[in-house]
Image (cartoon, grey):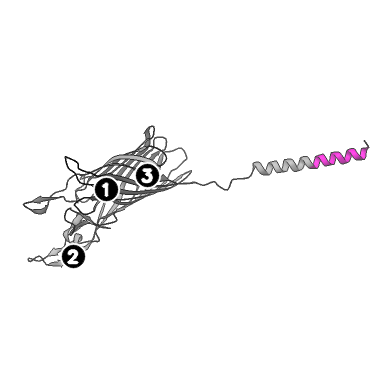
Amino acid sequence: MSMKCKACLLAFLFIAFTQTARSQVLITTTVPDSITYWERTNALGLDMNQISFVNWSVGGNNSVTVLGKAHFTRKYTRRYMNWHNELILKYGLNSQEGQETRKTDDQIQLNSTFGYRKDTVSNWYYSAKFNFQTQFANGYQYPNTTDEISGPFSPAYIFLGVGSEYIRKDLGLNAYFSPLTNKTTLVLNRTLADKGAFGVDPAIRDAEGNIIEHGSQSRTEVGILITNNIKRQIFKNIMLDHRLTLYTDYLNNFGNIDVNWQLQLDMTVNEYVKANIGTHIIYDDDVKATEEVNGGVVQVGPKIQLKQMLGVGLSYTF
């Protein structure tokens, strides 16, 4: 082979090698476009319970209960920042033979917590928390379906405060303490506001019961807020969801604690079928209970409110 041919061959190999190396460098240094610091979860559920009787010797009423649920979360995590948002929606109805359709569950809840930490290894965050709670429809003291005892934005609770938050992702633990939290109670239903429902100032009336000045439709408090959330798998296909909220006002009966405690077990049957069991306990000194006395309904002091839940239904997460 002549020297000229050898030179041409070497030049060709050099160019080919250079192009290959260049293309490899481009591939290994390309940054994917799909990097995101957001975690998104959408969960829709429908629980149903039906019972019917035909010639059943001990008797019973046919009934159908339906509960619709939705849970949306948006979480942003990057180095020093943690911003967690969730929207919880629930609405349930029960239809029983011989009586009108009744509401079994009704909830609108929006939570948002923003936290900032001083380094990437600390579990403590300087945090600000916002919480909003209300309901979709009027509530009644059944069988009375004429006079509502609650309704949309009657009440509505708004918590807004600053404090410190402890987060352990490996344990599914979140604990928050705020020494300065504003609690606003809204009662936009004029009839309920005039009665002084949910702690707002009632209407001022004359000796004959006529309203001189309508009741307040809001109540503002400033106090201490403590929350504790645990969400973790305790057994195979069983998820524990624990939420506890404690609040006390500085100026109005300091030390008298409002309690909101939810405990739920979510059990996965398969990808689309789930079962759940839970309890919800509320104690609020501003919410007065009612009792029937001599055929009439009278208002008494605050009592522990308890709700128990057991459901099986369809669930779709995306």
Q: In the rendered view, tell whether residue 232 sits above or below residue 102.
A: above
Residue 144 x %, y %: 16, 56
Q: Earlier in the sequence, mark 1 or mark 3?
A: 1
Instruction: Identify the residue under disc 1.
Output: 64
Instruction: Identify the residue under disc 3.
Output: 314
Under tag 1, what secondary structure? strand
Q: Which image quarter is the N terminus in?
A: top right
Residue 9 belongs to magenta span: yes
Residue pushed farthest left? 294
- Work out whether residue 174 or residue 42 is closer to the camera in this orientation and state it: 42
- Work out whether residue 82 or residue 103 is closer to the camera in this orientation and state it: 103
Q: CA distance from mark 1 to mark 2?
A: 41 Å
Q: CA distance from mark 2 to mark 3?
A: 46 Å
Foreground mark, 1 or 3? 1
Residue 116 x %, y %: 43, 46
Residue pushed farthest top? 235
Under tag 2, what secondary structure? loop
Q: CA distance from mark 1 to mark 3?
A: 16 Å
Tell me the number on the disc at residue 214.
Answer: 2
Task: Describe residue 235's horizontal placement relative to residue 223 as left or right.
Answer: right
* Circle 3: residue type: Leu
* Circle 1: residue type: Val
- Work out whether residue 119 or residue 204 is closer to the camera in this orientation and state it: 204
The residue sitting at 87% across, 41% down in the picture is 8
Residues in magenta, as a range: 1-15
